[in-house]
């Protein structure tokens, strides 16, 4: 039988960086009982985003962060959207360059991620925040 | 009952910039009668793209545009794909750096966008154009 | 009748560049018998990615490659994740800037790509490799 299932969760972030959410999404898949289908994950913010990234060696995520800081520096002279602080406009641009939604096939009840892939929230702002995610799972439960 | 619904629409664009299409996609969701599921939106072009962006303050979209003009300048000396004009190759690169498809969960018959999120077509070419989008909505109508 | 179908395939890559997989995904759609729905494609790696790109003129893909080589040069002095070679960290960053999953509506049994759109694996590493993809197709077969 095909089913459509929605779930919501949020995470606490403590500054710029990547926060793995693979386990939370896997739990949503388990709750849905879907064996064959697809999970869609949306981050409901414009200054945080999603990436599927290497989940083994944190040095790769640190280098990614160094790259993005150089590519989209705070206090760029041409920014006009600055009322919410110097990290706000860079956070919107970094969100655009990464992703807001990811869709991951499910087979045999498992997310079909590769061996080294994990799903991460990429928080782009300095202050501690709550970040909300919406999950949709559709597929065959049989 | 689960249903799968397709819709198509197009928008007129008048130069480089962002054009909000949240209302059009919400209308497709209403037509589908899906209450729990997911909406997938594809832009059917390679010189325009999709972004989920802040829909309140246009200064943020103006700064994003300034960033992309600096990152991918027209008339870069190493471009060879120039027959269709100086804005053509930058438009393909800007499309690659943003998105072609977005998938948005639906709950209680509503797109689960965050408070500040809107879905925008990002047109990357100067001339007035028609841009075609395809929408797929799958889910439970009950 | 709605159905959920999974498929897997892999491709051989011989160095950095784009490899079209539109035909393979269209074959998965045909096997699924879905007429109205959506195909979700995931590349199961963190140093290769997906792009929907112009499939007519290879000069556009060559210019995209030149752009990415300039944007994310090998041997950047600040990279610390270097054990797997100088092309490894740039490959992760290039993956983040492009896409890991794409979702494409299906209508009348066909992927709703635009006239000039093809789906490509973007391999970001030099050595010959096998790249695995997972496909999920959900929709109405009637």
Image (tube, coloured by chain):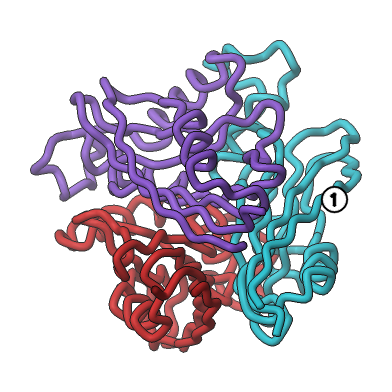
Chain colours: A purple, B red, C cyan
Image location (x, y in percent) of residue A139: 60, 58
Q: Is residue B99 left or right of residue B116?
A: right
Q: Is residue C63 above or below residue C133?
A: below
How packed mark 1 is, by other alpha carbons closer than 10 Å (few <14, some 14-19, many 20 or more), is some
Q: Circle 1 marks a residue in which chain?
A: C
Residue B73, position in %: x, y?
47, 56
Question: Is B124 or C28 nearer to us in this picture?
Answer: C28
Residue that mark 1 sits on: C9
Q: Residue at x 40, y 33 (%)?
A: A122
In the drawing, does residue A99 fall left or right of residue C10? left
Task: Kindly tell me whether residue B107 is visible in this rendering.
Answer: yes
Please provide percent x and percent y for residue C42: 67, 49
Q: Quadrant of the N terminus of chain C?
A: bottom right
The picture places residue A96, in percent across and down from the top left corner, at 40, 50
Q: Depth check: C85 or B71 in front?
A: C85
Q: Residue at x 44, y 64 (%)?
A: B37
In this view, the residue in front, B135 or A53, is B135
Q: Is residue A27 above or below residue B70?
A: above
Above/below status of C90 relative to B32:
above
Q: Quadrant of residue C80?
A: top right
Q: Secondary structure at mark 1?
A: strand
In the rendered view, tell whether residue B130 sits above or below residue B70.
below
Left or right of A132? Residue A54 is right
Total marks drawn?
A: 1
Query: Which quadrant of the rendered structure holds the C terminus of chain C?
Result: bottom right
Residue nearest the observer in this picture, B6 or C119 = B6
């Amino acid at each position: 039988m095909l089913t459509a299932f929605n779930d919501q969760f949020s995470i606490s972030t403590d500054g710029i960086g990547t926060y793995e959410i693979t386990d939370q999404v896997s739990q949503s898949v388990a709750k849905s009982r879907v064996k064959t289908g697809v999970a869609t994950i949306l981050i409901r913010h414009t200054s945080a985003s999603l990436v599927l990234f290497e989940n083994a060696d944190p040095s790769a995520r640190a280098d990614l962060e160094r790259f993005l800081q150089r590519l989209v520096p705070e206090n760029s002279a041409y920014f006009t959207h600055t009322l919410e602080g110097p990290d706000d406009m860079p956070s919107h641009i970094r969100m655009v360059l990464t992703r807001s939604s990811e869709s991951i096939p499910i087979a045999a009840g498992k997310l079909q991620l590769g061996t080294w892939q994990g799903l991460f929230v990429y928080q782009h702002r300095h202050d501690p925040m709550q970040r909300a995610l919406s999950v949709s799972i559709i597929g065959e439960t049989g």
